[in-house]
Image (cartoon, grey):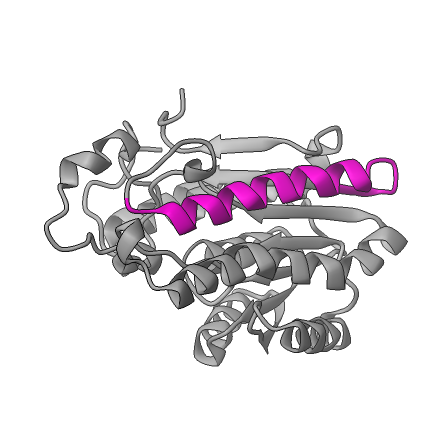
């Protein structure tokens, strides 16, 4: 798959369509008879993941803080003959997560696959970063996966299954103006490894996908601080350019599937050669 040449902030276009079609051609039926729960499923990587799992046979609970986004993803899935349910969820709220998981189970059944994709970010000079923004990034990116895993693990332990948490290449390397984002994604990585160790032998696998640059709406929120030098970000630019959400979804689907049954506690860097 060739990288896209023009970043669209997730708006799509011909390059995205070509990538989606090419990736879709590899899809099998690895999730037939299974139920999947995807956070951040209303846009970007989360949407692509929900669609990919549905294409491969899963009944999908699409969780997102945006009711409109979740509904749009479900419409896309059902129009293609799949089964999905939209559930509004604020992953930073213990009560919202508990209610959303209960609603998802009622709608499509107990999950065997959980994908934590919801995330936010932004560039800030550390000395200028508002505390509330630091806390919000960690709440969505790190506390969110914890709350969702805690709420879904009883179902996974009972029936067996897998968790895929989406981190970032910033979990593996430093990035200027991104202290909160780097900290949150590194936390996701080690949280996942700890969970993998805890549930080793109990029928639950936990793995991590660490994307590089992906053309999604999220990157539109990463505006540089005033006066910042873009050259300071050159070391985090993937040599192969930007990927599409569908390419990330393919890697997530692999780790979520039984095809990776011997894999747990792993970190799959899907970053166009950035962390070679």
Q: Quadrant of residue 137?
A: bottom left
Q: Residue at x 26, y 47 (%)?
A: 15
Q: Is residue 162 shown left or right of residue 254?
A: right
Question: Residue 257: x, y in percent?
Answer: 68, 42
Magenta-colored stretch includes residue 96: no
Identify whether 127 is placed above or below 201.
below
Q: Residue at x 68, y 33 (%)?
A: 265
In this view, the residue in front, 176 or 128, is 128
Q: Is residue 169 shown left or right of residue 236?
A: right
Image quarter where the N terminus lies is top left
Residue most extreme to the top: 276
Q: Is residue 251 visible?
A: no
Q: Residue at x 69, y 33 (%)?
A: 260
In this view, the residue in front, 11 or 75, is 11
Which region is colored magenta?
177-205
Question: Residue 50: x, y in percent?
Answer: 55, 58
Q: Is residue 143 shown left or right of residue 141?
A: right
């Amino acid at each position: 798959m060739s990288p896209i040449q023009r970043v669209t902030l997730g708006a799509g276009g011909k390059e995205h369509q070509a990538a989606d079609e090419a990736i879709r051609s590899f899809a099998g039926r690895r999730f037939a008879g299974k139920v999947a729960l995807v956070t951040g499923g209303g846009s970007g990587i989360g949407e692509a993941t929900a669609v990919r799992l549905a294409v491969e046979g899963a009944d999908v609970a699409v969780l997102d803080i945006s009711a409109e986004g979740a509904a749009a993803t479900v419409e896309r899935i059902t129009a293609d003959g799949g089964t999905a349910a939209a559930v509004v969820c604020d992953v930073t709220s213990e009560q919202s997560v508990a209610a959303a998981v209960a609603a998802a189970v009622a709608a499509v059944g107990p999950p065997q696959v959980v994908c934590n994709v919801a995330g936010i970010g932004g560039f800030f000079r550390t000395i200028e970063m508002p505390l509330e923004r630091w806390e919000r990034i960690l709440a969505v990116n790190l506390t969110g996966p914890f709350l969702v895993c805690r709420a879904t693990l009883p179902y996974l332990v009972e029936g067996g299954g897998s968790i895929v948490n989406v981190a970032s290449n910033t979990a593996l390397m430093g990035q200027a103006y991104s202290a909160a984002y780097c900290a949150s994604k590194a936390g996701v990585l080690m949280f996942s490894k700890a969970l993998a160790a805890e549930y080793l032998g109990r029928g639950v696998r936990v793995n991590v996908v660490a994307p590089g640059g992906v053309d999604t709406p999220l990157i539109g929120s990463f505006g540089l601080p005033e006066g910042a030098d873009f050259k300071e970000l050159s070391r985090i630019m993937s040599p192969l350019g930007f990927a599409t959400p569908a390419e990330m979804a393919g890697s997530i689907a692999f780790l979520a599937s039984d095809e990776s049954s011997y894999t747990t506690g792993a970190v799959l860097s899907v970053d166009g050669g950035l962390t070679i």
